[in-house]
C-alpha cells in the first residue's frame, strides 16, 4: 500500500531538468611503448590474474597503454577538424618552447595507485621532473583551448595527475556489480581484493625505484570507440611526431639533409 504522507521536500513547477551529461568519445594523449613499462604492467597483470581470475577481464591490453592529456566530446567532422587544428598549433608551440630545448622529452613512472573506490588502477607519472611539469602545462593549455570550443566534458583538475591506466572496473561493470552482490556485507569488495594484490606486488618489488621511462613518439587525437584490428584506439590525428632516429641522434648533425624531427597533422575524417 502506498504511503499518503506528504513529501516534505519543496516543489517547484519550473524546476529545470538536470543537464544531460556529455560523455567523451575522443581523447588526446600519447601511447606507451617502453619495454620496461610494458614488462612491469604484464607482471602486475599476471599477479592479478593469479589471485583474482574472476576480474581478469578488467585488465587493459598492454598494446593499448597510453597517457591521457584531456578527454573530449567531438560530435561531427567539423568538431574533429577544429580539434585537429588546435593540436597542430599546439605542437608547433611545444616544439619551439617546451620539450625541444636540449633533449627528447622523457616521463618517469614511479608507482602504482588507485582512483575512486579502488575502481581504477594506474601507474603514476612523475610530475616533479622538468618534463613532467612541462607536460602538466601543455595539458592545462590544451584543456583551456578545447574548453573555449565547448569540447571538454569535465573541468581541468589541479594538480594534474597524468597516469597510465592498467586495470579498471568500467571494462565490465556488470561483472563487478554481480561479484560484489554475491558477497556478504562485511566481506571486502573485489576492488579491495585487487588493492591487496597490488600492495603485495609492491612489497615484493620494493627494490625497484622506477617502473620505467617513456619517450613519447607523438601526441595523438584518439577515438574511444573506433578501434584498429589489434585493439588499439583508432588514431585520427598525429602531431609532434618524433622519429626513432631523432631519439638516437639528438644533438648530432642533420643526417643527409633530413631533419629527424617531424611536425605534421594526419587527419582521418572517415566515419
Image: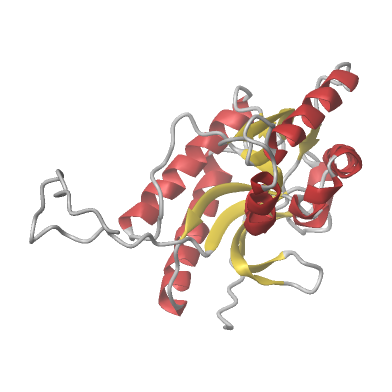
Residue lying at the far front in this picture: please name it.
1
Residue 87 is left or right of residue 115, and the answer is left
Residue lying at the far bottom in this picture: please name it.
271
Q: Residue at x 47, y 59 (%)?
A: 72
Residue 251 is left or right of residue 22, and the answer is right
Image: 14 above or below 205: below
- Indicate the position of residue 155 as horizontal and vertical percent values: 38, 44
Residue 19 is left or right of residue 132, and the answer is left
Q: How many marks?
A: 0
Quadrant of image for the N terminus: bottom left
Q: Nearer the viewer, residue 119 or 6?
A: 6
Q: Nearer the viewer, residue 128 or 169?
A: 169
Residue lying at the far left in this picture: please name it.
13
- Indicate the position of residue 50 as horizontal and vertical percent values: 91, 41
Q: Residue at x 62, y 58 (%)?
A: 220
Image: 19 above or below 120: below
Quadrant of image for the C terminus: bottom right
- Indicate the position of residue 8 as horizontal and vertical percent values: 14, 43
- Looking at the picture, the colour scheme in use is secondary structure
Q: Nearer the viewer, residue 119 or 35?
A: 119
Residue 94 is left or right of residue 109, and the answer is left
The answer to which image quadrant residue 96 occupies is: top right
- Residue 33 visible at all: yes
Q: Nearer the viewer, residue 152 or 171?
A: 171
Q: Residue at x 64, y 38 (%)?
A: 163
- Residue 105 visible at all: no
- Indicate the position of residue 11 as horizontal and vertical percent values: 10, 52
Q: Residue at x 74, y 72 (%)?
A: 228
Amino acid at each position: 500500500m502506498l504511503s499518503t504522507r506528504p513529501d516534505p521536500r519543496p516543489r517547484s513547477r519550473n524546476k529545470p531538468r538536470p543537464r544531460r551529461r556529455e560523455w567523451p568519445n575522443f581523447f588526446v594523449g600519447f601511447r606507451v611503448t617502453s619495454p620496461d613499462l610494458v614488462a612491469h604492467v604484464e607482471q602486475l597483470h599476471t599477479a592479478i590474474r593469479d589471485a583474482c581470475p574472476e576480474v581478469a577481464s578488467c585488465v587493459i591490453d598492454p598494446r593499448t597503454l597510453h597517457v591521457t592529456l584531456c578527454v573530449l566530446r567531438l560530435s561531427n567532422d567539423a568538431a574533429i577538424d577544429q580539434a585537429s587544428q588546435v593540436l597542430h598549433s599546439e605542437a608547433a608551440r611545444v616544439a619551439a618552447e617546451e620539450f625541444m630545448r636540449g633533449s627528447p622529452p622523457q616521463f618517469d613512472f614511479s608507482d602504482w595507485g588507485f582512483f575512486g573506490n579502488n575502481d581504477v588502477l594506474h601507474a603514476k607519472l612523475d610530475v616533479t621532473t622538468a618534463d613532467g611539469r612541462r607536460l602538466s602545462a601543455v595539458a592545462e593549455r590544451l584543456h583551456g583551448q578545447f574548453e573555449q570550443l565547448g569540447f571538454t566534458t569535465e573541468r581541468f583538475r589541479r594538480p594534474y595527475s597524468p597516469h597510465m591506466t592498467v586495470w579498471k572496473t568500467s571494462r565490465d561493470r556488470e561483472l563487478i556489480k554481480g561479484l560484489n552482490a554475491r558477497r556478504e556485507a562485511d566481506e571486502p569488495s573485489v576492488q579491495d581484493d585487487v588493492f591487496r594484490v597490488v600492495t603485495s606486488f609492491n612489497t615484493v618489488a620494493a627494490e625497484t625505484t622506477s617502473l620505467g621511462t617513456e619517450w613519447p613518439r607523438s601526441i595523438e587525437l584518439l577515438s574511444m570507440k573506433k578501434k584498429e584490428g589489434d585493439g588499439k584506439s583508432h588514431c585520427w590525428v598525429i602531431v609532434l611526431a618524433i622519429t626513432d632516429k631523432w631519439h638516437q641522434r639528438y644533438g648530432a648533425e642533420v643526417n643527409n639533409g633530413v631533419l629527424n624531427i617531424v611536425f605534421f597533422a594526419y587527419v582521418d575524417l572517415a566515419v
